[in-house]
Image (cartoon, helix red, strand yellow):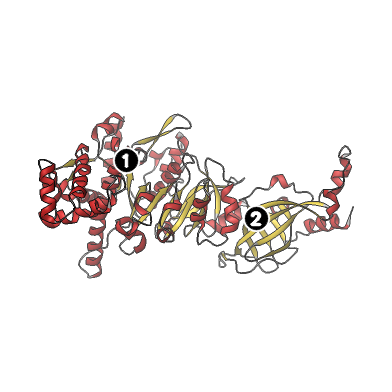
């Protein structure tokens, strides 16, 4: 046996103070590295390079600290450059066995993110950010389930089980308190599981009681139910899982009933509720010039707030439009273009002459602790309708929250319940040219000043304003192909160069790179299952109900911790009508 091989084995055997699980998970020893680039671990001869994957957790036993990190790259090396040029007799297995681990070896690049207590069970020394690196010849191991629980916490009312680390069965949890403090981003190309990941996050927020959520459900996937296109089945939405805690609003009552859903409220929006700012936001989808879009402000000045749009659309013909253009000193063709585009909005059945008080009704449900899903029905395929309704309602709700927050600060009332606004196709609201004009851009910049944050869902994060992206506290990223999108997601993140390789190697389904305020370090997660009867039981039972549930594990064996007798009655009535 060679000296190098003996050294490796002796390092493996020198595991005093470590349990058998550590010894079984031994990977190798640290040979070089830096704080910014991470450390390189030379694999032990007994560890196959094929058994180590990018994204897996690694612990390193230093002399003063235990380091917890993630594998960011895997490579093959050799100590003799002639190995690449001299032919080998691979017909003799003894030759390859003799060279492996000595002249030829594998290495793993590890980015140490945290330092942990040197002695397990030392609760007083919580994991903290690594500001140093382990010395050379420190022993590296595959992280154990106990290590994962120490770093990410155990499932409880503050920690939600989002999935499992790669090649591990342990539950990896996110901190719900930190999750809702700042805006959240869910990114990934089409078909990578963004919707399922978002459903899980919303279940966690609902169970924790940390905030209410208002979901602008473009494709009717979060309320009553949605379709799993991969498996060709329908899966339950939030309303079916938590009927007493979720209210469904709809713009299209006929669509809801065809899908077997009974909405709590039907949304109607008055023409008088539309403001010139809403029209400016629709400039791209309506194909309006800047001059035409800004003409809405002239119309408001002429006819008055709340009256301008209906008065404008009531004009009889193009001649009347041109006469009005001369009166308000607007370019006639621009005003004519605005008239033609706005008449298209009349096809939206949810637009009516009288105000529907939709925003006020949504606020009433939110104040009762409900979570609201606004389904768009057939209008979800029309981006103009989605942008108009989402921006209009969010602006009015935000205004109400600002007033309530200011009254609370003055001692005249209580603070509004924290709210998470969920929007899809977020780049349409938050591009650099549009974000300054939308309420969503304002909310992102305000952080949590008025108890309102965002959850943005998008497949093109590179199109979202960099200022807005910098305010996204927790990012959950499924597979992305475009280099600009990858760069946008990782911008401003420590270790972004190493994480780029991790993100590029995500599986196309059920994997996500998660990092930010809700986690102590970046992590690749295999997201938990959603769509089976067992998954529904686990989701509705929740961490606080597991011990109280019946032997069959049914969710009816115990009640939701936050469920009041009034909510219980409402849930049971809703379940009765769904049968």
Q: Kindly identify the residue that appears in the image at 31 percent across and 39 percent down.
A: 380
Q: Which residue is mark 2?
A: 58
Comparing labels 2 and 1, the label whose residue is closer to the camera = 2
How many numbered marks appear?
2
Q: Nearer the viewer, residue 95 or 532?
A: 95
Look at the image and tell me in which quarter the C terminus lies.
Answer: top left
User: In the figure, 459 relative to 397: above or below?
Assistant: above
Q: Residues within 10 Å of mark 1 (few under 14, many from 20)?
A: many
Left or right of 202 in this view: 412: left
Question: Spatial distance from mark 2 to mark 1, Cα to Cα?
Answer: 42 Å
Left or right of 532 in this view: 262: left
Q: Which residue is mark 1?
A: 243
Q: Is residue 262 visible?
A: yes
Q: Residues within 10 Å of mark 2 (few under 14, many from 20)?
A: many
Q: Nearer the viewer, residue 66 or 244?
A: 66
Say which mark, if any, is on residue 516. none
């Amino acid at each position: 046996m060679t000296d190098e091989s003996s050294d490796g084995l002796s390092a493996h055997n020198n595991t005093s103070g470590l349990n058998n699980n550590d010894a079984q998970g031994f990977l190798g020893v640290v040979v070089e590295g830096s704080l910014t680039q991470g450390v390189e671990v030379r694999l032990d001869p007994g560890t196959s390079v094929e058994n180590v994957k990018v994204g897996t957790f690694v612990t390193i036993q230093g002399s003063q600290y235990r380091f917890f990190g993630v594998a960011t790259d895997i490579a093959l090396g050799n100590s003799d450059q002639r190995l690449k040029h001299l032919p080998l007799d691979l017909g003799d297995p003894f030759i390859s066995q003799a060279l492996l681990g000595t002249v030829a070896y594998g290495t793993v690049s590890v980015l140490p993110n945290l330092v942990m207590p040197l002695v397990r069970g030392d609760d007083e020394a919580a994991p903290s950010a690594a500001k140093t690196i382990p010395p050379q010849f420190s022993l590296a191991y595959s992280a154990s389930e106990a290590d994962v629980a120490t770093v990410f916490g155990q499932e409880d009312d503050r920690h939600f089980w989002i999935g499992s680390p790669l090649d591990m069965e342990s539950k990896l949890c996110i901190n719900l308190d930190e999750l809702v403090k700042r805006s959240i981003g869910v990114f990934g190309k089409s078909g990578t599981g963004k919707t399922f990941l978002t459903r899980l996050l919303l279940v966690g927020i609902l169970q924790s009681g940390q905030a209410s959520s208002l979901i602008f459900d473009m494709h009717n996937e979060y309320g009553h139910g949605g379709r799993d296109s991969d498996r060709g089945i329908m899966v339950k939405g939030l309303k079916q899982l938590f009927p007493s805690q979720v209210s469904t609003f709809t713009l299209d009552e006929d669509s809801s009933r065809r899908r077997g859903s009974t909405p709590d409220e039907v949304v109607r929006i008055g023409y008088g509720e539309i403001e010139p700012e809403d029209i400016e936001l629709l400039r791209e989808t309506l194909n309006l010039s800047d001059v035409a879009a800004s003409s809405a402000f002239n119309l408001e000045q002429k006819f008055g707030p709340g009256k301008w749009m209906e008065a404008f659309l009531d004009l009889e013909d193009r001649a009347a439009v041109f006469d009005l253009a001369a009166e308000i000193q607007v370019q006639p063709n621009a005003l004519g273009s605005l008239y033609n585009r706005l008449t298209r909005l009349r096809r939206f059945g949810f637009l009516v002459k009288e105000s529907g008080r939709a925003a006020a009704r949504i606020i009433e449900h939110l104040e009762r602790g409900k979570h609201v899903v606004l389904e768009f029905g057939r209008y979800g395929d029309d981006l103009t309708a989605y942008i108009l309704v989402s921006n209009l309602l969010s602006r009015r709700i935000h205004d109400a929250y600002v007033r309530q927050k200011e009254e609370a600060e003055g001692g005249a009332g209580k603070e509004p319940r924290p709210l998470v606004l969920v929007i899809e196709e977020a780049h349409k609201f938050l591009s650099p040219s549009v974000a300054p004009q939308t309420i969503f851009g304002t909310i992102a910049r305000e952080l949590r000043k008025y108890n309102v944050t965002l959850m943005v869902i998008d497949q093109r994060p590179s199109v979202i304003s960099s200022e807005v992206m910098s305010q996204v506290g927790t990012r959950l990223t499924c597979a992305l192909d475009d280099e600009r999108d990858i760069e946008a997601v990782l911008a401003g993140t420590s270790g972004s160069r190493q994480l780029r390789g991790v993100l590029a190697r995500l599986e196309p389904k059920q994997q996500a790179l998660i990092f930010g305020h809700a986690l102590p370090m970046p992590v690749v997660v295999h997201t938990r299952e959603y769509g089976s009867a067992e998954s529904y039981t686990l989701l509705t039972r929740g961490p606080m109900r597991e011990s109280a549930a019946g032997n069959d594990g049914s969710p009816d064996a115990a009640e939701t911790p936050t469920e009041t007798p009034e909510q219980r009655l409402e849930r049971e009535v809703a379940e009765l009508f769904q049968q």
